[in-house]
Every structure is written in C-alpha cells, then in structure tokens.
Image: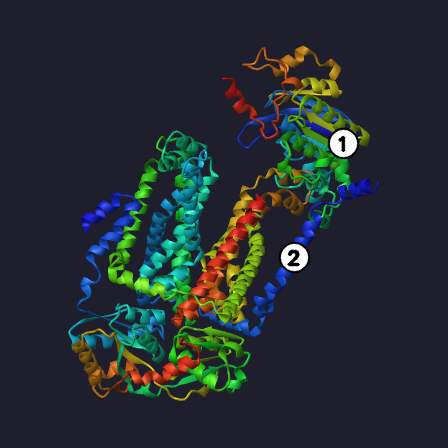
Amino acid sequence: MTGVAALRASAMSDPAARGRATSLVLGLVVLWPLLVIAEFKPAAIFEAQNLKTMAGFLAAFLPPETGQEFLVYLGRATLETLAIATAGIVLAFALAMPLALLTTRVLSVAEIGPGPGRRRAQALHYLLRAVLTVLRGIPELVWALVFVRVFGLGPAAGVLALALTYGGMLAKVYAEILESGDTRPARAILEAGGSRLQALLYGLLPGTAQELTSYTVYRWECAVRASVVMGFVGAGGLGQLMDQAMKMLNGGEASTILLTFLALVLAADALSGFLRRQVGEAGTGGRRSGIGSVGVLLGLAGAAAAAISFVYLGIGFGALLTLESLRSIGDFTASFFPPDLSPQWLSRVGYGVIETLAISAVGTLLAVVGGVVLALPASGRYGLAAEQFARFFLNTLRSVPELVWATLTALSVGLGPFAGVLALALHTTGVLGRLFAEALQNAPPQPRDALRDAGAQPAAAFLYGTLPEVAPQWLAYALYRWEMNIRMAAILGFVGAGGLGQLLYFELSLFHYAQACTVIVAMLLLSIAVDAASAGARRRLA
Amino acid sequence: MNHTLRRLALKGAFVCALASFLVPSLIGSAAAQENVLRVSAIPDEAPTELQRKFAPLGKYLEKETGMKVSFVPVSDYAAVVESLATKKLDLAWLGGFTFVQAKIRTNGTAIPIIQREEDAKFTSKFVTADPNIKSYVDLKGKTFAFGSPSSTSGHLMPRFFLQQAGIAADKDFRNVAFSGAHDATVAFVAAGKADAGVLNASVWDKLVEAKKVDTDKVRVFATTPPYFDYNWTVRGDLDPALVKKLTEAFLKLDSKNPEHAEIMQLQRASKFIPTKRENYDGIEKAAQSAGLLK
Amino acid sequence: MSFNIENASLTHANGFVALSGITLSAAAGERVAIIGPSGAGKTTLLRLLGAALRPTTGGLSLLGRDPWALPVGELRSLRARIGVVHQAPPLPQRQRVVTAVLAGRLGQWPLWKSIASLLYPLDIAGARAVLARLDLGDRLFDRCDRISGGQLQRVGLARVLYQQPDLMLADEPVSALDPSLARQTVRTLIADAEARGATLVASLHAVDLALAEFARIVGIKDGRIAFDLPAAEVSEVLLRDLYASECAGAAELPTLANEPRFAAHVVDAGPVTQGARCR
C-alpha cells in the first residue's frame, strides 16, 4: 500500500528536482566566497571619484597621437607583432602536427584488435598527452617571461613561447577534430595495412581539413592578440608600446595603439573568414584534388608570409643551439629545482590559487551574462541595425586584450582582484557573445517557430524552443573560456590584479626561482584540474 | 640568401620553419658582434625615454672606445641581470639592488665601474594624493604602489625603511601594486589607482621640473635616508683594457665642458666617480633583512 | 465556421506556385483528411491554416478572424487556439518530454509561468495524462533524444493534445508509426477533437487510413483541390487519378502497409526533387 502511494507520489514529482535544487544551493554556496575573494564590488565602478579619473583618461584619448616619429615606431611594432604571431604559429604547427598524429587514437594500428604493441602504444599515448598538457597548461606569458631570461631579449622569446603553448593547444584540438569526424575511412586504411600517415592523409584529412584549417587560422588570430600581450613582459611588438602608454597614462598614444590593434584584429578576422570560405569552397566544389588552385595559392601565400616573418625577426635560432647557450639553459632550468615546498610558501601559493580561481570564475560568469545579452541582438533577432551594432561592440570588446582592459579597469575600480574580474569579463563577453550568436544562428529554427505559431510569446518560444538547443553548446563554450580565463587570471597579476600572476612576477623579478617554480607548478596543476573538470562536464552534457 | 628565399617560397610552411631554424644559424649572431659593445639599462623609466637619454652617451662611448655601441632596450629588470650573466650584454646601467643580484648571478664577477656623484647618497620619495596620509603609519590598510620589484629606490629601500618604521608591506597594505617604473608610480598615484606610492628622488625632481606632475595634487610626504644606488657595471670577463677605457671615458665627462653638457644633463649627473662592490654591501644587507634575497 | 479559405493562392519567393485557387471551409467540430501525392501542397495548405504562411492572394478566416489583419497580440492569442502536429516533431533534442509537452500551453501561460515551469514542471499530472493517452506515460522524464522516432512523433502529438486547441492541424502525424499504432493514434486524435468539439484537419499519406477514419476527404494535386467529398464517395478512379504521375502510372496507392517507416526526420522532398526522382 505504502509502496504504491510512494510510487504514485514519485510519479507525480520531477525526479530531477532534487538534483537541480542541490546544484543550485551548492552553486550559491560556492559562489559567495568566490565573490568575496574576488572583491566583487560593482558599486566601485560608479563612485564619482573613479568615474572622474576614468573620464579624464578617456578624454585624453582624443585626439589620438599622430606624430610621425610615433607612427613610424608604431608601424614597426605592428609588423613585429604580426611577424611574431605568424612565426609562432608556424612553429606551433610544426610542433603540433606530429604530436596530433601520434596522439590521435583512431590512427593507432595497435588499437585494432587490439593488436600487438598495444600497451606500449598506450604508454606513449599517455606520455604525449601529458607533454601536451604541460605545454599548454603553462601560459605563453610565463614561457615568454622565462624565455626572455634564457634566450636574451627580443622577439625570439615571444615566438618560442607561442610555439610551445599554441603547439600544445593545436595538437590537442587537432586530435579532437580528427577523432570527432567519420573515422571509418581511416580505420579501413589501417585495416588494409596502411600506415598512420596514410590513414591521416587519405582517411581523416579529407573530412576534417576544413575544420583543421579554420581552427589554425583562428589560432593565428589569437596569436596576434597573444603576441601583443607578451609585449608586456618585453617580447617586443605592439604590446610593449601599449604597456608604456598605459602605464604612463598617455591617452593619445594609447588610443592610436588601440585603434591600430583593433584594425589589426578586424583585418585578421576578415582574413580568417575569407580563408575559411576558400577552404569551404575548395571542399565542396567537387574538385578531384580537394584543395584546388586557390588552396595551393593560399598555401604558398601562407608559406611566404611565414618565411618573411622569420627573416624580418632575424631570430638566430642557431645561436640558441650552441653548446654554451644549451648549458646556460640547463643551468637556468636547474635553478628552478627543487621547488620551494615549505608550508609557508605553499599556503601563500594556495591562496593565490584560490584568488585566481575566484577572479576567473566571477569574470567568466559576468561574461556569460553579458555574452547572452549581446548575442541575442548579434544573432540578428532584432534586425540588421541591432545586429551590426552588437557585432561591432563584441568585436571591440574582444579585440582589446585582457591585460589592456585590466589597466583600464584598474583606473576605474583601483588595483586589486576586482579590476581583474572586470577585465576578464569585458574581453570574454566579446568572445562568448560572438560564439553564442553563432550557436543561435546555427540552432534549428523549427522548434522556436512551431511554438510561435502556437501563440507563444517570443521570449517563451526562445526559452522552450531555442535555449535547449543552444544551452549545452553555450555551456561548453563558457567552460572552455573559463579554462582559458584561469590561465589569463594567473597572468593578470602582472599588472597588479592579484592572484598567482603577481606572485610569479614578483618571485621571478627577485630571482627566487625555487619559489617561482612552485607557482608555475601550481598554475600547471590548476590548469590540469580545470581541464579534467571541464572535460568531465562536457562529457556529461553530451 | 636570395636563392634560399626563392626556394622557401616554393616549399610549404613546414620546410619554412625548418629552414628558418638553419639559415640564421649559418649567418650566426655571435661572429658579427666581436666589435660591438652591447649596452642596456634597467627599465626604471619608459624604454623609449631610456633610449633617448642614452643616444649622445652612446656616440661619445663609440668615439672613446672605437667600437660600435648598440643599445638594447628592455622592459624587464631581471632580464638585464640575466643577460649580463649569460654574456649577452657587456655594459649595463644597474640599480643598487639589481647590481647585488647581478653580483650573485655572476658568482661575484660583475664589476661596478662608475657611478654618478648623486648615486652615493640617493633617496626615495613617498608620494600621495590623499590629504589624510601624512606619515608612514597612515599607510596601513591603503593601496600602495612600488615601482618594479627589482628596483632599489622604487621598492627595496623604501620597503626596508618601512619595515624599520614598523610597517610590513605584505601585511599592512590592502593591496600592493608594482607599477614597473618610477614615472608610472606617479601616474598611478595621480590617477587614484593607488593611494600612495614611492619613487626615486631623481625621477621625481625631473617630473616636477618638467611639470609632468601636478604638485597641487600629488605631494611628497616622506623621504628616505640616503643610500648607494645606480652604477654602470661590466661583465667580469670583459677585456680589462676595454674596462679601463670605459672607466676613463666616464671620468673624463665634465658638465662644464659644452661638448659634454648634453650627456651630463640627460644622465642627470653632475660628475661621474669610481665605485666599488663594497659600496653595495649595505643594500645587500637591507635586501636580506627585507626578505628579498634568499 | 471554423475556417474559411476564399480563392487563396500562395506563391513562394522563388516563384514556385504552391497553392492556387483554393477555396475550402469547415464547420466547427468537423474532421477533414487531406490526401494527395508528395509535393501536392498539403503541408503548405496546413501552414496556411496555421497562420504560419500568409496567402499571396485570396481571403482567409480562422476561427472567425482574419489573422493577417490582427495586431500582434491578438494574432498571438488566435494562434494559441490553433494547434499543429508536425511531421518531424520540432522538439529540441535535449528537452525533456515533460517540458516539450507543457510547451503546448505557452500561448496561454503568462511569461512568469513559462519561466517557472522551466525550473520545475508546473503541470506534471496534465502532461502525464495526455502522454498516457498515447501510451507514453512512462516516458515523462526522458530526454527527447533518448526516445525512438515513433515515440517522438507521439510526444509532438501529446503537446497539441495538451494545448487543447479549437483548430487542430496535423501534418502526417503518424508517418513514423507502425500500422496498428498509427490507426490507434489517429483514433486518439479524433476522439480528442470529438470530445472537445474541436475541428481536426489532418494530412495523411496512407489513403486507407484516411478513408477509414475520416468522414470528409480533400484530395490535393499540384496546389489545387482535386476533390472534396465524403469518404464514401471517394472512388478508386478518383484516387488513381490523384496519385497518377508521369512515371508512376500503375503504382500502388499509398496505404498504411507501405507507409515509409520512421520518416520523422525526412523533410518533405518537394516537387522539384520529386520530378528529378521520376526521371
């Protein structure tokens, strides 16, 4: 009797409710301390004194600096930035391709059967995955800071830092893309006795080349931004100029640099869109070669750009490989070990970790809200004018790097974690808004239209018809960005926004390499943990 | 080279990457630099400003040594020290603390050769725009801006003297920021990014003279006791004859000589005097007691 | 009068004439089956009746109102009284069945209720009741991408049953179901319309099902009404004529037995590809 009653009661209540309520409560319980640690005080933005300071600085943006000497300097820095990004991506690509080839499971002959040598293959697989994690787990800025010490001054440090971090990222994403496509052709080739490379070229590439190319082009776009950021630690280019202008609060110069940078990013954006279209057409044009003459031309142009970049930067990689410099690299690396694991230091680093997490979590959360708000008009739901405006706004937010935002937000709310939160939120809003809008545009319209045709209000039709389609994708994007923002939050400390970055910058400056090593290891562990957590979350969403 | 380039253009990106590794290595950067004196300076001011300040001095040194002098701009203090230690620099303008670090990094071989007369009794100025801050004690719970963590006058000595006055920078401030450079510290304080800050007296005087700071708003509320600061340091294994030439060249500089006037004015020096390692022992002790040296 | 179409035509933006010279009306509570070959314009006609497409020329009145002369708010409340069963149920993959069903009343609910129901389903009992009528009571809390195509089609039906519209439009509502379930499901639909006095217009692929369950049959071919007769008067000749085309002269009539299975995700191919397939 009671059994039946219980059954009926359970049948009449939502079995997911308890889980939802628990997550909600848990979310709030976690969020609260995060807000406290991140010193979340939105009111500070609107304090009269802060508004005045900010307005004063922004007023100094006009007119932009147009002195000839400065423009020449700016032009050279812009070229240097482009060259660093291009050279960095080329090296990253050269690093990522073999790594991706080796870490893609579907390309493993030993997996079939499973055949002989499976255990060894698996061990190698895990080892390489670990290498990738280390490569991309340490932010490029940290690599740059370290490389500036070892390889001396100049763009070489920036190029190598990009190569390592982006090499790790590209390899991981390449492997994911390769595995997400139709893997049967590759398997067929392997089963027919083909080699790993053959299976890649004939089995996987035809289906994924477009996505691989567009991701690489997208990464190049990111590298342009990253190379600006690395300028902040002395790796040359626009960033170095920007750093000075921002520090000296030279509004005129800052605005010219920002405009240049905006133009650069928009151009990179346009170029990457153009390239992606070309690749798309080459893929669908029904040509036998699958690449076509346009593809060949573009490939050549890319190769030429890469060659010019290397020549322009004039990096003496040979000098890096002499016995003497290898020894000094060795000495330098050795001075980082063993890391300082004393309880006092660990507790400081531990707090830095928590602070970094809080800054990144709150910043990403704000960005999700902002991203949704801007993605709705940017997806064209409210007409062309709203779409264009929202897109422009998102592009502007996105093309200003977090570090630059941080120097601005520090003006408006003072130095400290909250400035970091705002900086992350502003930049990430630009990124997420664009991705969210794309997801909205790609969502099937039928569910929403059906609801509208049944008399639902637009908002309700959106919530029931579109949101369920895009929410998992949005969440995946948000998690992914959070992952990146943790790395970024670790860096923002370089401009005084707290977290691990400030500790690292301080310790590196004072040659306390053992302590710095602990911080780098903490950054790495943090990044690995987040990686695992977000991979788990994404699996659950799928 | 031309031939190589044409071939590069024809091959893919892969080949490019590899070739670029190899081509510059053939040219080699070391071979060409036998007759070049590589000079840098800690970026305690904007690197562009440093470059401007150095230009006439560079020309003068070229004339005196018969070598080509190239100035390498840097935006990271520690990179200068590290470059000196890895022999990527021959001569560097260092702060007292960076010299101590360089001495340690080079196992005591780096040689300070010359300093300005002013550097023997250097001071730092504490500045604020907050009318309520009148002494060190009022700084508790405020946001405070140092220059670079590696700066002597912008960080180490002020921290040391604050400590002597019973204020622990890591505990008593609400937030500690490192502006990176002395002029940036003033900008931070003027803009309210930080409640107070500290910078070297020489830069402060320069900013006031050039009217780059609004003295009605930002004022000095404390000055540190004097200490040894900046010097020109050479790496330990530089040819002693060259070291001697450089030292003499600096000593010959005379602010009364119209040919030298511009150099001296840009260097903000009345006169250059010889210096020695022992002058910086005090700084080393201060660094140890402030916990900045381990 | 439940709806009334006066000499309506509909030309798509690409110049394709989907409907021409349609005049059709039905009294409240009537049940009409629409049959005809693929691409004849059945779906377009239903979309016209659902106020989802506007006729290029001609007059239209739905539940006594001209939808295209109404202000936005009133058009919305008119639409809330019209329910459409789609051939491919337009349900988000990751939505749960209960939410998908409750969405049927979004047109009647205020916004706050729509939002609250997303957090916790506000009418579990109601959703379960309609699902039970379609043998789906136990699927209430499953996700739409975890159930079969046939079950999904019935969830789409359940949504409209839950909506309780005055005018029910069904576009091939049972195309993904096996014959006996198809028949049973159509009967459920008819019974619901009957019980509430609602009008039901269903396009059906299976001629035998239409003839057996519906009193009035409208045959459509090439965007025009070929015949509009009581079921008893629809002759074999009329049907052959309706389904005759250049390449399928002697083809069998589409019936439940040769219904294409699980076509839920096949979008109506349209006349162009149809022609191409013939050649």
- Between C130 and B289, the residue placed more toward the observer is B289
Mark count: 2
In the picture shown, does residue B266 fall above or below C165? below
- Between A119 and A246, the residue placed more toward the observer is A119
Instruction: Give the amino acid type for the residue marked by disc 1 in the picture.
Output: Arg
**Image point (34%, 69%), residue name:** B79
Disc 1 crowd, CA 10 A, few/some/many (<14, 14-19, 20+): some
**Image point (38%, 67%), residue name:** A65
- Between B194 and C167, the residue placed more toward the observer is B194
In the picture shown, does residue B75 fall above or below A392? below
Question: Residue A62: x percent and y percent?
Answer: 43, 67
- Between A200 and A290, the residue placed more toward the observer is A200
Q: Report the residue that reaches farthest toward the right.
A: A1
Q: In this rendering, would A81 be left or right of C72?
A: left
Q: Which chain carries label 1?
A: C
Question: Residue B101: x percent and y percent?
Answer: 34, 75
The secondary structure type at the circle numbered 1 is: helix
Residue A419 visible somewhere in the drawing: no
**Image point (30%, 46%), residue name:** B14
The image's mark for residue B204 is none
Residue B45 visible somewhere in the drawing: yes
Query: Splitting the image into 4 quarters, where does residue B198 fall?
Result: bottom left
Q: Mark 2 lies on which chain?
A: A
Question: Residue A392: x percent and y percent?
Answer: 49, 54
In the picture shown, does residue A312 fall above or below C221? below
The secondary structure type at the circle numbered 2 is: helix
Instruction: Give the amino acid type for the residue marked by disc 2 in the picture.
Output: Leu
- The residue pinned by badge 2 equals A26
What is the distance, in whole Å, between disc 2 and disc 1 at their CAs?
A: 39 Å
**Image point (18%, 48%), residue name:** B3
- The residue pinned by badge 1 equals C133
